[in-house]
Image (tube, rainbow, N blue to C red):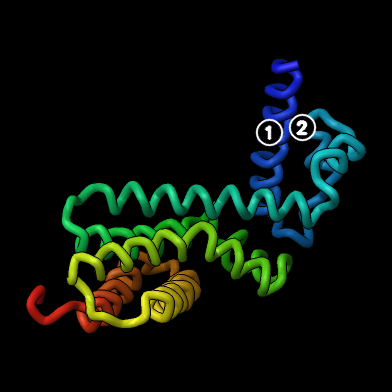
């Protein structure tokens, strides 16, 4: 029984990996389920057994990408023990991770269009905003940031970073320069939240 469960999980993961490659290379609209299942050595019926439809498969891929970027952000934040540096490092890692060539089409282009705004925002909240909110909450409890609504700060910063990522994605010919330009602005925004005694 355990072997069957492990095999099933491996099949699902394999499908997600193959689908991610196809969605990245061809976009959601042009990715072929026939080619995905053929490469996975499965039938369409087997795919539909694990995922209701193409959109369901894309959602699984989208979540995998979100989770990966979230892990990248957490790893970058953990490089420092200073809460402020953790916040700044995490913001930069989010910008860098989201515009990686193997992520941007899924996260920025097809994600909102295929999943719809509500599902896209729920996923963003689950994988990105919750971590940001926890960090801001912790820093507020340490009197490092002003006594403002953490919910409002989270949404405003998240919105700013999502928009910055879209802007960076349109200037990939000078990616590192525009990421640094965005980070200069983000640092100024963050400084505005900082308690005076910590500046």
Total tally of numbered discs in the picture: 2
> Label for residue 40?
2
The answer to which of marks 1 and 2 sits earlier in the sequence is: 1
83 or 73, which lies in front?
83
> Label for residue 14?
1
Residue drawn 75% across the image and 49% down it: 57
Among all residues in the image, which is located at the extreme front? 141
Residue drawn 70% across the image and 59% down it: 27
Judged left or right of residue 124, residue 4 is right
Instruction: Report the mark closest to the observer, 1 or 2.
Output: 1
Q: Relative to residue 11, is residue 49 depicted above or below? A: below
26 or 187, which lies in front?
187
Q: Give the x, y percent position of residue 142.
A: 19, 65
Residue drawn 31% across the image and 82% down it: 148
Q: Secondary structure at mark 2?
A: helix
Q: Give the x, y percent position of residue 172.
A: 44, 67
Judged left or right of residue 68, residue 96 is left
105 or 51, which lies in front?
51
């Amino acid at each position: 029984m355990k072997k069957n469960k492990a095999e099933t999980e491996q099949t699902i993961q394999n499908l997600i990996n193959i689908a991610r490659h196809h969605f990245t290379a061809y976009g959601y609209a042009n990715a072929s389920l026939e080619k995905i299942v053929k490469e996975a050595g499965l039938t369409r019926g087997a795919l539909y057994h694990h995922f209701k439809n193409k959109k369901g498969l894309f959602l699984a891929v989208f979540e995998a990408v979100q989770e990966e970027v979230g892990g990248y952000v957490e790893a970058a934040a953990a490089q420092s023990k200073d809460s402020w540096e953790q916040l700044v490092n995490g913001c930069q890692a989010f910008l860098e991770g989201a515009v990686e060539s193997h992520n941007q089409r899924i996260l920025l282009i097809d994600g909102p269009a295929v999943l719809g705004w509500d599902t896209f925002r729920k996923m963003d909240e689950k994988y990105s905003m919750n971590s940001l909110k926890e960090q801001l909450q912790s820093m507020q409890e340490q009197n490092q940031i002003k006594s403002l609504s953490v919910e409002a700060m989270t949404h405003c910063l998240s919105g700013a970073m999502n928009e910055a990522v879209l802007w960076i994605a349109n200037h990939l010919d000078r990616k590192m320069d525009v990421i640094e330009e965005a980070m200069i602005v983000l640092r100024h925004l963050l400084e505005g939240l900082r308690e005076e005694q910590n500046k």
